[in-house]
Amino acid sequence: MISRLLVLQSGEIQIIGSNNTNRVNVRVIAATNKELKSMVGEGKFR
């Protein structure tokens, strides 16, 4: 099974029980009140 992050990176999904890979075009909009630059440096955010 492909992880959710990999789906966002590769743009491909595979339905459970299927051998076919499907291309998807997805955009994610999110907000946070965390300091993402410092979290990246700490290895807590990718």
Image: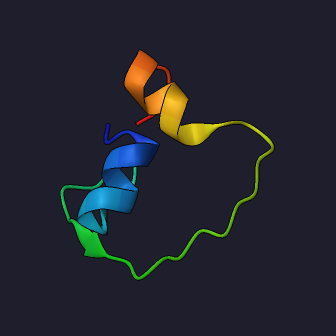
Question: What colour scheme was applied to this rendering of the protein?
Answer: rainbow
Q: Is residue 42 left or right of residue 31?
A: left
Could you tell me which quadrant the N terminus lies in?
top left
Report if residue 32 is visible in the image: yes
User: Residue at image x 20%, y 65%?
Assistant: 20
Could you tell me which quadrant the C terminus lies in?
top left
Name the foreground residue: 45 vs 26: 45
User: Residue at image x 59%, y 68%?
Assistant: 28
Depicted 20 relative to depicted 43: above or below: below
- Residue 33 placement (x, y as % from top left): 81, 43
- Residue 22 placement (x, y as % from top left): 28, 73
Q: Is residue 39 left or right of residue 8?
A: right
Q: How many marks?
A: 0
Report if residue 17 is visible in the image: no
Q: Is residue 28 left or right of residue 46?
A: right
Name the foreground residue: 17 vs 30: 30
- Residue 21 placement (x, y as % from top left): 21, 65
User: Residue at image x 30%, y 58%?
Assistant: 9
Depicted 35 relative to depicted 25: above or below: above
**Farthest residue toward the bottom?**
25
- Residue 11 placement (x, y as % from top left): 30, 69
Name the foreground residue: 39 vs 15: 39
**Farthest residue toward the right?**
33
